[in-house]
Amino acid sequence: MPLDRSGAVPGTVTLHVEELPPSGPSKGYMFLIAGGPGQGSAHTFDLGSADSAALFRFLFPGYTLVAYDDRGTGASGLLDCPPLQTATTPDGEEQLAAQCASTLGAGAPFYGTSDHVEDLDAVRASLGAATIGLFGVSYGTKLALAYAAAHPADVDRLVLDSILPPNLPDPFSSNVAREMPAKLSAFCAGVCTSATHDFAGDVTAVANRLALKPASVAVLQPNGSSKTEKLDGVGVLSVVIDSDLNPALAAELPSAVHAARLGNVKPLVRLYDLDTKASASTAVDLSVALFAATVCRDGPFPWPSDSPPAVRSALLEQALAALPAGSFGPFGAWASKLGNASLCVDWPTPAGGAALAPNPYPNVPLLALSGSYDMRTPTANAASVVAQFPQGHLIVVDGVGHSVTTADFSGCSDLAVRDFMLGNAVASSCPRPKFLLPPLAAYPAATTPKHLSPRATYAVVAKTLREAEAAWMIVDFSGPTAQVAGLTSGKLKPAGSEGFKLSGYGIAPGVAIGGSVKISKSSKLPLTFDGAITVSGRAASRGVLGLVKNSLRGTLGGKVVG
């Protein structure tokens, strides 16, 4: 592909394309488009894997599957700016983004969605496909919709999972902040009572409080040292948003936020630290440089695209001040840092203003999937798009987060996609799937008596074990197999993909557990665990407990418990 289709800036980008034919005659082409922006589709969907090939052949029976890495991702001229890639907080990201743009040089403006649209069309033409179907996830839905508007005659159907309309994201992510409380309340209705009766109120109170006065807490590390971690309001909302991709994080969050509201912020800060580590990725998996190059070229922003960076901060502040009350729901204007405007305020000109085709969408069949717990692309996005397609059909999956086809463990949404592709009747909704892990109960008290009875020790141990299972899965669900420190003591170490080992692991002072834990062989959802647990600590009634499918029983302080 030419880097700049106008020819003003020389250079080319070679796109890596993968094609998987069906086992029989082909009904047509289905392009798989990953999210981010920054995920290479060929790398993400991995059609060379037997498991991935089986999944997507099931979803799109009889279709030739195509996945290619967008320019700047995967094997298509990967963009990598290490300082920006490894940044863990929004603080200073605008300077890192600007530095990244300077390394990209004259090519920086040519990674916008409109460039990706024309690359997609070139891949279609190279395959000789008259029309194509498009399966997009997250940002991939924005690219698919932008393509459908620019090349309506070349699209025959759309399957969109977690929709981001072409006119979004909002530069301040105000829509995300406004819709967050209702989503939190719906997620926890009837299932979080052992942790909190007001998840949304807890998040609102804690985030606003930490926005005014951030917390700095020493967080235990697996090597036994401590690291001081700072958590502010944006950090709180970032963890909430991340929980829509990580069900184990979603299981831990209600109890951690409630503890913070009651004055014990340490569990939440430690959870923020775990989430930061679990969310780290290489540029090959998700190029943050490409993310910045795309969103900073696309916009929209509250400044003219040709404005110099020096004037943008003032324009941004003016735009924030002009927003009506309630623009961020119950949160203050500080929540605007969730949006891309802060990231792109120092991006070299042009920043924003990349026009997408204003054409109406083609009248083709469309299936939209949305999770009711999706924080980053709320269901309202999907509804607004489906309303523009006479043949549009929306399925909302209760309790599921972002990227429905991977987050819905019930298989209902997968069956809906397959039925849609086969021309069968499609379900009108999907029931709430069972939890991978149910929400945790409230944390034990931050202080403990000098000695706990066997029964009181057992209660703390049970909570500690459930928290260890979730902490292990927070990290494991995101791919890494790193060790995890306990809240107050010890650590856990992954033992393969099915379990972990505990060494002096604690979430309450004076009570620690050790032993090996693994997922029960016959476990269904919610997952259950088996293992042998030793109990120690200055405040504990010591002993040994057996764990069989989450049933904990044994002897503590010479007495049978469980």
Image (cartoon, rainbow, N blue to C red):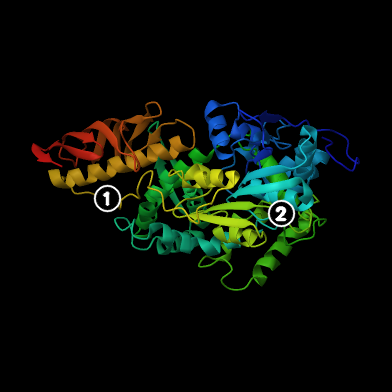
Q: Residue at horizontal 32%, vertical 36%?
A: 523
Q: Residue at x 40, y 35 (%)?
A: 484
**Quadrant of the snapshot with the C terminus:** top left
Which class describes the residues within 10 Å of circle 2: few (<14), some (14-19), or many (20+)? many
Residue position for label 1 = 444
User: What count of labels does the image hold?
Assistant: 2
Q: Nearer the viewer, residue 364 or 313?
A: 364
Residue 450: x, y in percent?
17, 46
User: Is 491 placed above or below 219 here?
Assistant: above
Q: Nearer the viewer, residue 377 or 329?
A: 377
Q: Is residue 62 left or right of residue 260?
A: right
Question: What is the quadrant of residue 41 in the picture?
Answer: top right
Mark 1 neighbour class, 10 Å CA radius: few under 14, some 14 to 19, many 20 or more: some
Give left or right: position of 207 versus 468: right
Dot placed on the residue nearer the N-terminal end, 1 or 2: 2
The amino acid pointed to by label 1 is Pro
Out of 436 and 47, give the one closest to the viewer.
Answer: 47
Which residue appears farthest toward the bottom when viewing the image?
A: 325
Q: Which residue is mark 2?
A: 345
Residue 214 position, x and y percent, is 48, 56
Q: Is residue 148 visible?
A: yes
Q: Secondary structure at mark 1?
A: loop
Residue at the image point whose x is 55% and y is 43% from the top:
418
Q: Is residue 330 above or below residue 440?
A: below
